[in-house]
Amino acid sequence: MSSGYENKGFEASPELPPPYKEQPGLPMTEVGSPVATNNNKTKEQEITDAESQGVPDRIQWDSQWEFLMSCISMSVGLGNVWRFPVTAYENGGGAFLIPYLIVLIVIGRPIYFLELTLGQFSSFSQIKCWKCAPFFKGVGYGSMIATMAVLTYYVSIMALTVYYFVASFQKNLPWANCDETWAGDGNCNGTGSATNQSVPEMYFLREVIKEAADIKNGVGTPDWKLSICLVFSWVLIFGSLIRGVQSSGKVAYFTAIFPYFVMIILLVRGLTLKGAWKGIEYFVRPDWGKLVEPGVWYAAVSQCFFSLNTGFGSIIMFSSYNPFNHNIYRDAWIVSFMDTFTSLLAGFTIFAVLGNLAEELNVDIKEVVQGGAGLAFVSYPDAIAKFGWVPQLFAVLFFLMLFTLGLGSSVSDAGAIITIFCDRFPKLVRWHATLVVCLLGCAVGIVYTTPGGQFMVDLVDFFGGSFVIYTTSVLEVIGIAWIYGVYNYLDDIEFMLGFRLGWYWKICWGVLIPIFLTIILVYSLAEDISPTHNNQTYPVIALVFGWLLAAVSLLAFPIFGFQAMTKVVATNWKDKFLGSLKPHPKWGPRNPKKREEWLEFKRSRPQMSIFERIKQKKL
């Protein structure tokens, strides 16, 4: 090989090629590596270093604030507003914060930080970063397929917010009074009320999504209004990503900050309404008995996991555009704090208004609480319609906030997919890749604008989202902590950040996360082996499609693992397999000078897997 040494499997770390020379004039650290002087290098200097040695330059964030705003915008999404408040209410109220915070500390934050550091250290996306353990490259492909599946229906939800946003500009909110043109004859009682269903619910089901009773005879024909809203959403995503992080970083200032502005306005308005404090009391009232129920802990893991957006590759993608020595540790704490704070703020905002709705209808608050789309498009709009002062204004702000939250998360997920292709094909024009991804996403998303669209949302969410992401996340942590080695990875982080992480990270990555996520995965399969929508079971053909979607995502792991084995120079398959678990010769920092310094740094450190350390009792 050109590097001057034989590739014995993928055994590359920390052996140095013979041509390696220490850089003269650079002061050494106590372990003999020129680490300290480069922490102050500018972004331009690092890019120049790479260009001078034949490495394609990688664009970087224009400022650290753009990266931080993008991470907040990515993690703070629709789930914080319409999922967390109801999940907390149904799983113990204020008591739910105990399992949620425990899960955040033990699982959520460690995985989030692992993905941040993996992207920043390698300067590659979720597939090429697996040069540390090539057999696990399929984890990146599996999560990419899951991200594509989730993204298609996530943008369709954004389309619904566009529909409601436009409808909110009417003189009278259309869901405020029953209209037989969409409610049907005999369903309105002449006073503007519905006879057997709330008006907002009837408006959502019959006028907006025109939901079918089932999908046994297919999903139906796309609705042209929703299709236009879908195209509009994808056009904005394309515009946000046309120049990569250099354009999406600017958009992130708005998508990260504007939702807080609206939530505070809605909270202040809600607190002035009758019944608001009763609603908040329902939200925070603890039910300590719930803490012993396994379902509550499962709900905490699910909420924390998907709230931070871990497992989708977007975190790795964002951090891969950072300068090598950027203080990612600080950012991880800021983002995780803001995510939790936003969930609580949204809970108070939502339940203050729902408390008023229950007061107006003279019913118990549990009668007006709905989760997911029901909260966003039925319960909350119903409450806004009863505001005495300019309800249209609050409706416009609410749905613009929802769209903004969705845009921030969608831009990050679409960007992760685009970056994979750009990393794989360096000569690919980025905006061409962006256009193709957006066109394909829009074309697939049309299915969600049909009468059976919400059935497909739940189906794809279960098989293409939750099920796959849990699995790939377990494999992700195992690949880093057990195969590459948690101590090796801690060495890499120490070289990159300049300080050593403690026992908390070793225990979480090496023990707690693999065990807990495996239990959660098994529990989710046992509880939800066959998904339903509105208590309607899916036809066999739909379930077959779902399992095929899951299979395509999960089979990526063994398929690309086998491909990695075939590239190992060995005489038998056992050695090929073991070789594919070792770092590739090109693993390490992308910048050549950083890589040389890292190799020198690693030569002074024992390179053992976690299993070898256990065997030698060096934990």
Image (cartoon, rainbow, N blue to C red):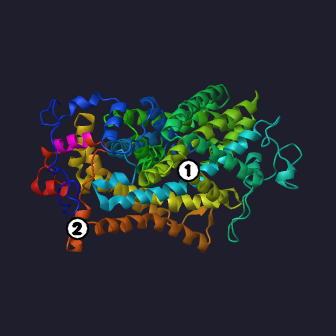
Write down the quadrant of residue 11 in the picture.
bottom left
For label 1, the crowd category at 10 Å Cα-Cα, with few meaning under 14, some 14 to 19 and many 20 or more, is few
Region rendered in magenta: 593-601
Spot occupied by residue 62 in the image (x, y as percentages of width and height) = 45, 31
**Quick one: which residue is furthest to the left in this view?**
616
- Precedes in sequence: disc 1 or disc 2: 1
Q: Which residue lies under the disc numbered 2?
A: 569
Front residue of 111 and 520 = 111
**Dot 2: element:** loop
Q: Is residue 609 visible?
A: yes
C-alpha gap between disc 1 and disc 2: 37 Å
Front residue of 556 and 285 = 556
Please say if the residues under marks 1 and 2 sit with CB atoms less than 8 Å apart. Answer: no
Disc number placed over residue 177 in the picture, else none: none
Disc number placed over residue 432 in the picture, else none: 1
Write down the quadrant of residue 260 in the picture.
top right
Spot occupied by residue 537 in the image (x, y as percentages of width and height) = 61, 67
Residue 360 in the image: above or below residue 264: below
Q: Quadrant of the N terminus?
A: bottom left
Q: Amino acid at mark 1?
A: His
**Dot 1: element:** helix
Front residue of 525 and 441 = 441
Spot occupied by residue 485 in the image (x, y as percentages of width and height) = 23, 52
Residue 230 in the image: above or below residue 47: below
Q: Is residue 89 visible?
A: no
